[in-house]
Structure formats: C-alpha cells, structure tokens
Amino acid sequence: IPSFPMMVTEPTSNDVLSGRGKIINSHPGNVHFRSIVNRLKFEYVKSQKSDKKVFANVIVESIRSLNPPGRFLKQDKETGMWYDIGEKLTLAKTRQALREGAPVIEKWMEKKRQKQQQQQHEQQQQQQQQ
C-alpha cells in the first residue's frame, strides 16, 4: 500500500466529490449518490441503531460497483489533483448524508403514528356504540 494517496487528474461521472458549491453538487456522481441516499433514507430513519451502519455500506458498495467504479474524491487545493478520501471518511460522509433531514422524517413518522392511533381509537368507540 503506497504511503501517498493515488492522485486523479479528472474525476469520472461515477465519482462522488467532496466539497461544497454548485459544481460539486451538480456533478453526476454526487447527483446519483444523493438519489441512492434519498431512496434509502426513510428505511434508515425507521431502522434500529444497530442496523444503521449497513445502509452506509450498501450505498458505498453501490457506488463502487458502477462501471467505471465510483470513487469518493477530494480535490487538493494546491495541485488541483483529486485523491480518494479513504474508507473511514467515505463512510462518515455517507452516514452524514443519511442523517440529513432525519429529524423532519422522524417528526412526520410520529405524527402519522399518532394519527393512526387516533383513528383506531375512534373506530373502537364507534364499534362500541353500535
């Protein structure tokens, strides 16, 4: 294993780029990454804490299994070259993406659960009155 990161001059359309801004957000790999995250986010929020790490692994593996394989890259500000951020940061980035918006989803799920309980209670009262 080399002691220095492999440098990439040009990311592919399957690579997920770290950073901020319109160019990063609109990169095809980032758009695809977010679409996978958004498809799994509801299930992620519903899952037990012990199961949550599986979701990040599934997303990372789906990016890496593309052709060409997607990588998780960050640009070196001095050289302009890109380098792989490594497994630890890749998983951290993915878990963070899954957590974004989670409180809103949890709140919505709780309201839905309360509404269902209220409807069940009303149905039980109606049945008792008949």
Image: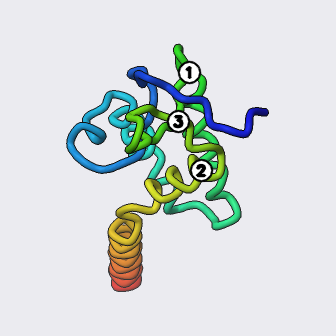
Mark 3 to mark 1: distance in Å? Answer: 14 Å
Dot 1 corresponds to which residue? 69
Name the mark nearer the viewer: 2 or 3: 3
SS at circle 3: strand
Amino acid type, residue under disc 3 in the picture: Tyr
| Quadrant of the image containing the N terminus | top right
104 or 65: nearer the viewer = 65
In the rendered structure, the answer to whether residue 50 lies left or right of residue 33 reads right
Residue 118 horizontal/vertical position (percent): 35, 80
Residue 77 horizontal/vertical position (percent): 38, 44
Amino acid type, residue under disc 2 in the picture: Leu
Residue plotted at (44% across, 38% down): 36
Residue 70 horizontal/vertical position (percent): 52, 26
Q: Which mark is residue 91?
A: 2
For marks 1 and 2 on the same chain, the one whose residue lies earlier in the sequence? 1
Residue plotted at (36% across, 48% down): 19
Amino acid type, residue under disc 1 in the picture: Pro
In the rendered structure, the answer to whether residue 37 lies left or right of residue 31 reads right
Residue plotted at (70% across, 64% down): 50
Name the mark nearer the viewer: 3 or 1: 3
Above or below, comparing residue 81 to residue 58 in the picture: above
28 or 112: nearer the viewer = 28
SS at circle 1: loop
Residue plotted at (30% across, 31% down): 27
Mark 2 to mark 3: distance in Å? Answer: 16 Å
Dot 3 corresponds to which residue? 83
SS at circle 2: helix
Dot 1: few (<14), some (14–19), or many (≥20) neighbours within 10 Å? some
The answer to whether residue 130 of the structure is visible from this angle is no
Mark 1 to mark 2: distance in Å? Answer: 16 Å
Q: In the displayed orientation, state which residue is furthest to the left.
A: 22
For marks 3 and 1 on the same chain, the one whose residue lies earlier in the sequence? 1
